[in-house]
Amino acid sequence: MKKIKRFLIKNILDKNNIALDRIIPREINSFYLSKSLYRTKQWEVAKLRLPIDYDGIYQLNLEYVINKNNEFSLTEFFEKNMIRIESEINFLRADLIRNYLIYSNNKLGREFSSDCLIALYLRSTLKKKRIIRLFTLLKYPRFFQEIDNVESKDKLDLNKEFNEFYRLKRKLGVDLSNHSVNKGLIDNKFIYYYYLDDADKAQYVCDILNENINTDVLGFIEKVMVTDIHTDGVLCAIMKGCYGKGVSLNSVNFRKLLNISWAACSFDDFISLYEQSDIIDIDLSFKYHLIKNDFDSIIKVIDELIDDSDVDNLTRLNYLGFFAYINQKSGSVFTYFSQLESLGIIKPTYNIYEKLFKGEIAAAEEIRMSDKNSLQSYINNNILEHFPNYKDLTNKRVLIVAEQGVADEVRWSRLYQFIDYNNIHISCDPRLLTTFERSFTDIKFISHKRSFRASGKHITDFHKDNIPFSIDFIKDNYDYVISTSALFLILDDNKRRTVNNMGYLIPKNNSYDFSGEQFRVGVLWSSAMKVPLRKLRYAVSLEEVIQLKLLLPEVEFYSIQSPMTADEERVCRENGINLIKEVDLYNDFDNSSSVLSQLDAVVGVSTFNNEFAASLGTVFYHIANAPEVAFMRNGQVEKLNYHDQLSNNTVTVFPRKGYTGRSKEEINSDCIAHLSILLQQQALFVQNGDVA
């Protein structure tokens, strides 16, 4: 009878807790009302309703959920309650235990003993047992057999165990390439995959896909697409195992298969599968129309969504609407941004684009910095909020933290020449350290390997890991700390402006043995980040590069694509494109600087090797095969030109017949023909001893 009564009270409270909280005076505390508010995620209010003298386990759970999104409050919470968490583990939330273990490992560097892990395991309920067991597998493989033998393992389904493993692996940042686990102890076939040598992974994927393809298998494959897409043979194994089986799958799995094809950039397979299906799915239909260059169909639906104020769909799909508008109705793109904003869909990226499209680069960087997820916001909120002026850069202790990718780092380093003072310290990718030190002799560079957004870390961990020192050390040793973007606000227009015929990085002083004295061009056709939108919007195929070579038989072409597949190397050799084998262009930036600086020009998409070459003084012909690229680089919409407002020594190569109503192949072909004319002109300049 008591249980029924408690159940009825709980039901009544849960349905009416917000109303009751408003009615009941705040000075009245109630454990049951607090617990009800907690269950409906009204955590701050739940804390106010908790009796002052209550000190039970529920309070720990409540304090955790209130503090979990604030790194410093969470750290304080874990430090204060460490003993209690471990002794009362059975009664605490599973995510609290997961984050406690991650915190203990990542922040404290704590070493758990086997006895401690086993004790925690035995005190835990089923879900938390799984967390501790997988934490042990990932971080303490030497203890795994001990904990595995303690008692019979939980029987929760394969997929839940794998999802927990995947989550922990990502947050702990574990590299399993040199693991010491006896694979025979791993009885989950999805987890087992991650302990295989790379050479064995493709066949293992084939074996799994030859079994019954169900939701669990497709969930596993989706995660493999994130982690191992570039592992030799894995992508081919996935497509071979999945393609043609879609028609026999239910709608949930069919959607997963289509999303796998999309993530794998297997666009022909995506189209074929989509056209076989009768699924009505607006997200998939937009992707289908994007692949087919049917921008008018996307605009039609987007306009209907705007008219209907369909915020949910627009929030998910507005980026595809952007691509459609910028291709077909570029003059209306600012109106599109305003329509989204009027519906409450605020996208800082669009505000940044708008400023760049208008040539207001400093304003664009100010918007980027003010975003709540930016590095500068993290610095302002957690380290130092003071912002220096230019005079401060000449005489105060300033730490500048590099951000974004290495191509961005090199591009923005053109500003370092204006702050080359010994009081300036700048973090940098370790591969750039020698080149930067040679180029800016007074700045102290701090080698620091940073992670990138694809790492999947929480934004606070992501930014904290990318800052080279502890927060306490920074506060004690620096007057100011800023991100590199902040330099655009501190320096004036003359210093921000790009110039040609001037490198700002000094290459290593040794010569690469190029064959012959012909005009030398480095070619690069694709970014190392092979993600669907990059490939659809910005990639140039190797076949199109070969067409460029055929148009310019007197030019010596060298591949600076890195890394390259064996098939790409074969195609290059067969078509007379030279390979640079003596230097690792992907990792050895210092020796790469010597090679790239001796080329007369580089061509292709915006990625590190091309941006690096431009920083060294080599002309970079940037193939702007998507309108947003040209407008962003030109600093204006619709009126195309060669100017580049972001990089020195860079020429924007646009399709002479424009973008509207044309396929990607037509646009690329037009860019290649345009590029061949520009290269011929530069070759003549060089031949005559003039400056190109």
Image (cartoon, rainbow, N blue to C red):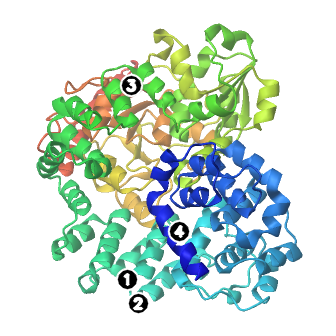
Dot 3: within a 10 Å radius of its alpha carbon, few (fewer than 14), some, or many (20 or more) residues?
some
| Earlier sequence position, callout 2 versus callout 4 | 4
Answer yes or no: do the residues labelled 1 and 3 have beta carbons within 8 Å? no
| Earlier sequence position, callout 3 versus callout 2 | 2
Marks 3/2: CA–CA distance = 59 Å
| Earlier sequence position, callout 1 versus callout 3 | 1
Q: Nearer the viewer, mark 3 or mark 2?
A: 2
Q: Residue at x 61, y 89 (%)?
A: 155
Depicted 199 relative to depicted 623: above or below: below
Marks 1/4: CA–CA distance = 53 Å
Q: Nearer the viewer, mark 1 or mark 3?
A: 1
Q: Quadrant of the C terminus?
A: top left
Q: Secondary structure at mark 3?
A: helix
Marks 2/4: CA–CA distance = 52 Å
Answer yes or no: do the residues labelled 2 and 4 have beta carbons within 8 Å? no
Which amino acid type is marked by label 2?
Answer: Asn
Q: Which residue is mark 3?
A: 686
Q: In x, y percent, where is residue 279? A: 20, 72
Q: Which residue is mark 2?
A: 210
Depicted 623 relative to depicted 131: above or below: above
Q: Residue at x 42, y 56 (%)?
A: 530
Q: In x, y percent, where is residue 680? A: 28, 32
Left or right of 427? Residue 369 is left
Marks 1/3: CA–CA distance = 53 Å
Dot 4: within a 10 Å radius of its alpha carbon, few (fewer than 14), some, or many (20 or more) residues?
few
Q: Secondary structure at mark 4?
A: helix
Q: Which residue is mark 1?
A: 241
Q: Is residue 653 visible?
A: no
**Residue lying at the far top of the rendered structure:** 391
